[in-house]
Image: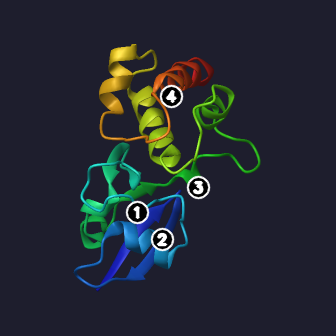
């Protein structure tokens, strides 16, 4: 079946099978490798993308369900050669280690700050509870979200 997706503000048409996951379509058909395959069961958040302004787990969504929707991946966050303030905050605060979880973390944090421009530490922890990092103790990530929020004002 043919579906229409707006990915990072560009309209696309793609043929998908009924069982194709959004994760697979984004990686295979559009080469968005920032969308990571982590656990495959919706537990780690590595596959997070933003759909219509909200974080979703692309490993848990059939591509056909996303037909007609607006999708944002980490590749669409930066403005050409300039990183988005949330991306830069993750670098500046040392919140990037191996980098595997970073795209999902940054997208989730950015969606939070768009909805709540001055999140508390508890708000950040709640928003990121579905994004697992195996490298850090999360303190640098939480600080990065605070820093990113300040920079986005």
Q: Verify CB contact (< 8 Å) between mark 2 and mark 1.
A: yes
Query: Looking at the picture, how far across and down is residue 133, in whole percent?
Result: 43, 40
Q: Quadrant of the C terminus?
A: top right
Tell me how far mark 4 sits from mark 3, CA to CA: 20 Å
Residue picked out by circle 2: 27
Which residue, given by chain and number where applicable, does mark 4 sit on?
141
| Residue 25 numbered tag | none
Q: Residue 75's mark?
A: 3
User: Which label lies toward us, 1 or 3?
Assistant: 1
Mark 2 secondary-structure assignment: helix
Residue indicated by mark 1: 37
Q: Nearer the viewer, residue 77 or 32?
A: 32
Q: Earlier in the sequence, mark 2 or mark 1?
A: 2
Q: Is residue 144 above or below residue 65?
A: above
Of 97 and 89, which appears nearest the observer? 97
Q: CA distance from mark 1 to mark 4?
A: 21 Å
User: Which is closer to the viewer, label 4 or label 3?
Assistant: 4
The CA span between labels 2 and 1 is 9 Å
The residue tagged with tag 3: helix, strand or loop?
A: helix
- Please determine whether, in this image, residue 110 is positioned above or below residue 151: below
Q: Is residue 51 left or right of residue 139?
A: left
**How far apart are the two marked residues, 1 and 3, measured between alpha carbons?**
16 Å
Q: How packed is label 3: few (under 14 Cα within 10 Å), some, or many (20 or more)?
A: some
**Callouts 1 and 4 close, C-beta under 8 Å:** no
The colour scheme is rainbow
Badge 4 or badge 2: first in the primary sequence: 2
Mark before the other along the chain sequence, 1 or 4: 1
* Measured Cα–Cα span from mark 4 to mark 2: 26 Å
The residue under the point 48% across, 35% down is 110
């Amino acid at each position: 079946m043919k579906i229409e997706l707006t990915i990072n503000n560009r309209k696309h048409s793609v043929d998908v099978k009924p069982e194709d996951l959004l994760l697979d379509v984004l990686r295979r058909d559009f080469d968005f490798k920032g969308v990571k395959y982590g656990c495959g069961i919706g537990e780690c958040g590595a596959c997070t993308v933003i759909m219509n302004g909200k974080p979703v787990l692309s490993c848990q969504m059939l591509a056909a369900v996303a037909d007609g929707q607006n999708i944002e991946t980490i590749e669409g966050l930066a403005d050409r050669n300039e990183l988005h303030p949330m991306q830069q905050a993750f670098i500046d605060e040392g919140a990037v280690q191996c980098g595997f979880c970073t795209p999902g973390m940054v997208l989730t944090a950015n969606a939070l700050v768009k909805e709540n421009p001055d999140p508390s530490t508890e708000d950040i922890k709640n928003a990121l509870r579905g994004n697992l990092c195996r490298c850090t103790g999360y303190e640098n990530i939480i600080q990065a979200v605070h820093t990113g929020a300040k920079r986005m004002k």
